[in-house]
Image: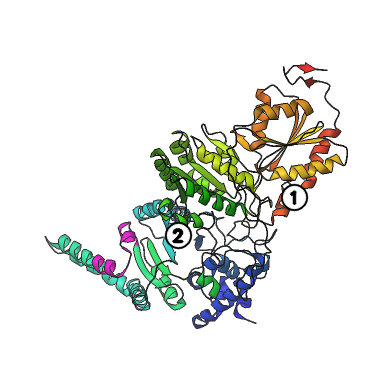
């Protein structure tokens, strides 16, 4: 039996001799690589925190002590150590383990996470609740250096330092480069400075200096400045010290002995503590070490060489967007691009290579990024902010107040609109149509395929106002786009098929699905129209009302929450036009958070598959026709 097989909870981990933990770390890495090679997932980040996670669970007593992960795409080792090793092969599969910590999955997952910058604030809330209850459990918040670029993280640090009560923040730094000598020296200094002897001496010295008559305070402040100068010269911790934290690091995040000694020492301190651990993304797997960005989130691959297993297919919508913005950027020097720490994920990497002076990576700071875009637009530029749907939520106020209220020509390239598959509820782009369409001045559009995406980006960049261009994750429809761009008339959709018995009003790539289902309906003698809406705001009111009057039966189809989404917009339109007798069935994402799984399964669960759509139309058509029909020109009831 290997070491990992013995561990059913952190209790068994503590029985393993400390000197054998490196052996356990290698077993964990091997299992993570083999599993992710089959399921896909976040590989490099998880390989980088194996020893750090082992040390945390070796010292602290979860779930009695509270452990909070930031983002959560580094929690695979945590799952393996907390009773989920036997189910690890189900990672990211439907009804299997989530790729992130999830409250419903384990008592060791105290918080469902998937967005960055949250762990300090959440941990601080837990910490204060425990202190108010007179309890003494430790709270440990783990946060990565990337997440430290989020303003929310500094807001949490600021309050934690102000409150001054013990909370342990672990900064996982996988970007800073430290030479071996400096790293070893800093590890030694931090372990010694966090130890009980040093802490006791420092407190006694502080009290002694302050008690010297007349000059005590001055001498103390001088000694404190000397200590800070020494630590500032040797460490990057002055910022955290200024915020009220005891800072320890940088520590080698792959040295379990040093980590364990430091964690044991800081448990006895009364102040807020920040432990700075330096790790290497992709540690132990050569392809991921060589290219950690590529292996941050990856699909199934061959573990022998790291090459993807997926078969070649149509380019993704993200790639089509990438090519299009590069073409347009070459024509118009006013076009600038903004990403929130995701140039590869959003397709802006190529633009950044071709136009480095016109590309801005603002870090994980979506709020700032949108305000920044507003300033660029106010000065006459054409900013394109490429942000995932689920992350744009974080900048909602800036979209409203700083862009739309000012009516500025900012283009929101809203990637990952709709269901995203195995990343699950924290990453599904289920709400963007609902939270964007009611904002004044905004134009909101969704392309049905690759060519329409290119035309819509071109159209958005010509428009004198804010535009949100929303497209899904994954491969396109296989439509070969034309070389030319053309401006689409704002608020005008596209007839894909005329019909008399019913109409499907579809948005985005679902329009192709609607057309295929309409062909099947024709085989059953049901003449179904298909209308590609293109625009959610403004709606093509003339065409949609014409279809409603002529058929009396509509199905709306969208990859968004039904509450407040595209179908709701159509219902509002019909009500405003007095077309209340039209039967409407809305298909979209139901009013619940959708779990992780493959796309086809999730579509089936949400009633967005072909059979649900076909049956929705048949159910409408099989009902007796209304005796009252509306005249297409007057809107009056006619027999």
Pointer 1 with pointer 2, Cβ within 8 A: no
Q: Around disc 2, counting alpha carbons within 10 Å, would you say few (fewer than 14), some (14 to 19), or many (20 or more)?
A: some
61, above or below 626, in the image: below
Q: Quadrant of the C terminus?
A: top right
Q: Position of residue 401 (x, y in %)?
A: 45, 36
Q: Is residue 363 above or below residue 90?
A: above
- Disc 1 is placed on an element classified as helix
Instruction: Give left or right: position of 206 versus 55.
Output: left
Residue where numbered disc 1 is placed = 604
Dividing the picture into quadrants, the one containing residue 120 is bottom left
Which residue is at 45% across, 59% downward?
146
State left or right for residue 158 relative to residue 552: left
Q: Which residue, as the protein is rendered here, is positioned at the far left?
A: 214
Please say whether residue 235 is one of the residues in the magenta stretch. Answer: yes
- Residue 503 is situated, as x and y percent measured from the top left of the image, at 76, 34
Residue 400 in view: yes
| Outermost residue to the right | 524
Task: Give residue 306's quadrant in the image.
Answer: bottom right
The label number, if any, that marks residue 146 in the structure image: 2
**Can you give x and y, in whole percent of width and height, for residue 508 in the image?**
66, 43
> Which range of residues does the magenta coloring cover?
227-245
Pick the residue in front: 559 or 62. Answer: 559
């Amino acid at each position: 039996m290997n070491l990992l097989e013995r561990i059913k909870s952190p209790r068994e981990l503590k029985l393993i001799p400390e000197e054998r933990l490196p052996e356990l770390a290698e077993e964990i890495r091997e299992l993570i690589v083999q599993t992710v090679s089959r399921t896909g997932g976040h590989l490099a980040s998880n390989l980088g925190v194996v020893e750090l996670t082992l040390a945390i669970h070796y010292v602290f007593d979860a779930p009695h002590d509270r452990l909070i992960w930031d983002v959560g795409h580094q929690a695979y080792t945590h799952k393996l150590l907390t009773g989920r090793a036997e189910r690890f092969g189900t990672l990211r599969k439907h009804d299997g383990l989530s790729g992130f910590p999830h409250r419903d999955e384990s008592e060791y997952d105290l918080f469902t996470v998937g967005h960055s910058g949250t762990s300090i604030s959440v941990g601080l809330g837990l910490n204060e609740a425990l202190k108010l209850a007179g309890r003494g459990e430790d709270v440990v918040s783990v946060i990565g250096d990337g997440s430290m670029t989020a303003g929310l993280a500094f807001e949490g640090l600021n309050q934690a330092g102000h409150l001054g009560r013990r909370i342990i923040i672990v900064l996982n730094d996988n970007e800073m480069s430290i030479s071996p000598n400096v790293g070893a020296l800093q590890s030694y200094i931090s372990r010694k400075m966090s130890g009980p002897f040093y802490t006791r001496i420092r407190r006694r010295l502080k009290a002694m200096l302050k008690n010297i008559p007349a000059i005590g305070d001055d001498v103390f402040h001088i000694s404190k400045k000397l200590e800070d100068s020494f630590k500032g010269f040797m460490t990057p911790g002055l910022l955290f010290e200024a915020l009220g934290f005891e800072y320890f690091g940088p520590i080698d995040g792959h040295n379990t002995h040093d980590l364990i000694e430091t964690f044991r020492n800081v448990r006895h301190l009364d102040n807020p503590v920040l432990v700075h651990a330096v790790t290497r993304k992709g540690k132990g797997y050569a392809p991921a070490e060589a290219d950690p960005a590529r292996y941050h989130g990856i699909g199934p691959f061959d573990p022998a060489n790291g090459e993807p297993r997926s078969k070649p297919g149509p380019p993704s919508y993200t790639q089509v967007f990438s090519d299009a913005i590069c073409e347009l950027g070459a024509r118009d020097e006013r076009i600038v691009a903004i990403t929130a720490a995701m140039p590869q994920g959003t397709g802006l990497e190529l633009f950044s290579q071709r136009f480095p002076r016109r590309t801005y990576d603002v870090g994980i700071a979506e709020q700032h990024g949108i305000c920044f875009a507003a300033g660029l637009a106010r000065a006459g530029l054409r900013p394109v902010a490429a942000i995932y749907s689920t992350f744009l939520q974080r900048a909602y106020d800036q979209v409203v107040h700083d862009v739309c209220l000012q009516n500025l020509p900012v283009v929101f390239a809203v990637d990952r609109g709709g269901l995203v598959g195995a990343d699950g509820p924290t990453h599904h782009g289920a709400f963007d149509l609902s939270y964007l369409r009611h904002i004044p001045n905004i134009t909101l559009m969704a392309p049905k395929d690759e060519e329409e995406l290119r035309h819509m980006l071109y159209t958005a960049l010509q428009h004198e106002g804010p535009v949100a261009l929303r497209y899904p994750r994954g491969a396109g429809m296989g439509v070969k786009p034309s070389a030319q761009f053309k401006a689409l008339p704002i608020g005008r959709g596209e007839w894909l098929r005329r019909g008399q018995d019913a109409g499907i009003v579809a948005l985005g790539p679902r329009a192709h699905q609607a057309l295929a289902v309409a062909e099947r309906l024709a085989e059953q003698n049901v003449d179904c129209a298909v209308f590609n809406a293109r625009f959610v705001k403004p709606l093509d009111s003339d065409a949609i009302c014409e279809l409603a009057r002529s058929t009396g039966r509509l199905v709306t189809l969208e990859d968004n929450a039904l509450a407040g989404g595209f179908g709701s917009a159509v219902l509002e339109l019909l009500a405003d036009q007095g077309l209340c007798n039209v039967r409407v069935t809305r298909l979209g994402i139901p009013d619940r958070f959708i779990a992780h799984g493959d796309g086809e399964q999730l579509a089936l669960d949400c009633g967005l598959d072909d059979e649900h759509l076909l049956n929705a139309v048949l159910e409408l058509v099989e009902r007796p026709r209304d005796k009252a029909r509306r005249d297409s020109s007057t809107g009056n009831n006619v027999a």
